[in-house]
Image: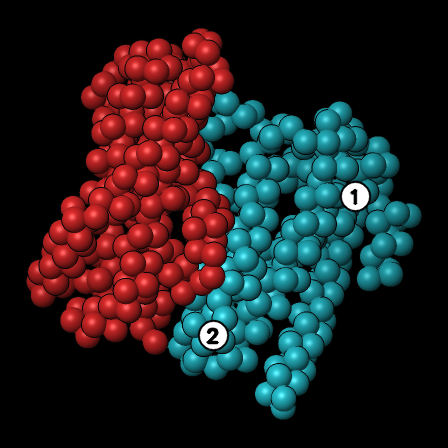
Chain colours: A red, B cyan
């Protein structure tokens, strides 16, 4: 379990750095709050269907995540610490540590966005437990699918736009299914079974991409 | 190829329920098939690159993705034309149309990623890894997502008249289709080789500078 210990060390290091600067957390949160406020302001309390609520909240989460999730690897590249990290830990441990860091970041952001969204948009959550479960699943899916992309774009120019460009199509199947799975929580009737199917499909898709990322990450990370 | 085109227009009987416009079938389906094949080839070249670290495989993968993008685009356009004829609208967010648009987005992002990395080795390994991830996402979008029962209730998949294998395709239609598939696959192989050779020339010119 050498890998797990090293991954935990990478996670601890990133969390400590993030707590010092709060760069990623504040940029994601501000972006998300601004877009929720914008949506709420432009719609002026218009009544939306459960499915529209589900779609909007996941779009907000995705674009907020796209602004901050590159932080983990970009900061290593900018500070020139990539080489040290390559020496200190195996590629798998780095990937896992960064994934857990992104997961923690997303969980914190979602814990704020979902209540704020429901408050500002007058969306009633009829099944809070289901909502929380789908939100957690979404955090796992988004971090699981995009962590390797962060390492890829850390080498590119104009990183954040390339990250959004590459992450969107890779995540799209998961996002479409997450909207499907969370619509019943907002009170969409009759699609309960469809929601469960969609949640299972998200799990399998994320699982496949995570296994592939685990296998491909050394090729992206090493020189 | 010329034989296939002539047969598609003259020899094959019109598809039931679609009339003469149904003949676009012989171009639409092979284009979609070649697009899928090309992206498979790109992912295979990516895998090969990661194994051998030979830049030849990298340019080969990029060339396959370029040709694949072209054919997928043609499949989208011919599909839209057909949709206008058969369903009365150019674009109606049928799961397949959505999926093919997403596949175009995926490979658009692939080219954006390639052009934003300067070092050749890094570009090669990054785009090889991305092409493999992209292939999985594309397979999921095209073959898995439209068949999920939950999605079907929201986007009812329109039945293509005369295109249902269960009802049996007439033998002449099948023959022309198979010939078209073979012809388009040959066309793809030819275009792919040309693209690889052009890339090789560019590479050599850069090295000689």
Residue A177 in sight here: no
The residue at 25%/59% (across/down) is A95
Dot 1 crowding, Cα within 10 Å, few <14, some 14–19, many 20+? some
Q: Position of residue B20 (x, y in %)?
A: 86, 36
Give residue B113's mark.
Answer: none
Q: Nearer the viewer, residue A46 or B100?
A: A46
Give residue B24's mark.
Answer: 1
The residue at 65%/51% (across/down) is B72
**CA–CA distance in space, label 2 to label 1:** 43 Å
Q: Is residue A6 left or right of residue B78?
A: left
- Considering only vertical position in the picture, is A138 above or below A20? above
Q: Nearer the viewer, residue B97 or A121?
A: A121
Q: Are marks 2 and 1 on the same chain?
A: yes
Q: Nearer the viewer, residue A40 or B77?
A: A40
Rendered image quadrant of residue B107: bottom right
Image quadrant occupied by the N terminus of chain B = bottom right
Dot 2 crowding, Cα within 10 Å, few <14, some 14–19, many 20+? few
């Amino acid at each position: 379990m050498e890998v797990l210990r090293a991954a935990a060390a990478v996670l601890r290091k990133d969390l400590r750095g993030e707590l010092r600067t709060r760069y990623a957390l504040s940029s994601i949160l501000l972006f998300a709050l601004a877009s929720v406020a914008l949506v709420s302001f432009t719609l002026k309390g218009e009544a939306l269907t459960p499915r529209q609520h589900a779609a909007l909240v996941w779009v907000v989460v995705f674009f907020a995540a796209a602004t901050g999730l590159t932080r983990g690897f970009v900061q290593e590249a900018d500070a020139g610490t990539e080489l040290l990290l390559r020496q200190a830990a195996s590629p798998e441990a780095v990937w896992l540590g960064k994934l857990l860091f992104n997961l923690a970041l997303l969980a914190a952001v979602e814990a704020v966005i979902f209540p704020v969204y429901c408050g500002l948009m007058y969306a009633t959550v009829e099944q809070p437990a289901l909502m929380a479960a789908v939100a957690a699943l979404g955090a796992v899916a988004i971090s699981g699918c995009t962590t390797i992309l962060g390492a890829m774009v850390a080498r590119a120019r104009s990183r954040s736009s390339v990250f959004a460009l590459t992450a969107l199509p890779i995540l799209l199947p998961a996002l479409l299914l997450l909207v499907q799975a969370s619509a019943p929580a907002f009170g969409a009737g009759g699609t309960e079974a469809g929601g469960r199917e969609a949640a299972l499909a998200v799990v399998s898709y994320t699982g496949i991409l995570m296994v592939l990322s685990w296998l491909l990450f050394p090729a992206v990370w090493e020189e | 190829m010329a034989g296939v085109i002539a047969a598609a227009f003259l020899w094959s009987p019109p598809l039931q329920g679609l009339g003469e416009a149904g003949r676009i079938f012989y171009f639409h389906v092979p284009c979609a098939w070649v697009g899928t094949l090309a992206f498979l080839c790109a992912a295979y070249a990516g895998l090969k690159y990661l194994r051998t670290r030979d830049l030849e495989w990298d340019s080969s993968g990029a060339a396959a993705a370029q040709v694949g993008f072209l054919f997928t685009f043609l499949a989208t356009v011919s599909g839209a034309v057909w949709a206008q004829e058969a369903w009365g609208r150019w674009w109606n967010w049928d799961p397949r149309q959505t999926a093919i648009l997403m596949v175009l987005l995926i490979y658009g992002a692939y080219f954006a990623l390639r052009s934003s990395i300067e070092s050749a080795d890094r570009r090669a390994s990054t785009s090889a890894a991305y092409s493999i991830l992209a292939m999985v996402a594309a397979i999921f979008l095209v073959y898995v997502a439209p068949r999920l029962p939950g999605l079907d209730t929201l986007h009812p998949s329109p039945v293509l008249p005369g295109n249902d294998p269960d009802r049996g395709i007439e033998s002449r239609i099948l023959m022309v289709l198979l010939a078209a598939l073979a012809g388009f696959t040959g066309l793809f192989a030819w275009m792919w080789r040309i693209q690889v050779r052009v890339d090789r020339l560019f590479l050599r010119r850069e090295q000689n500078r």
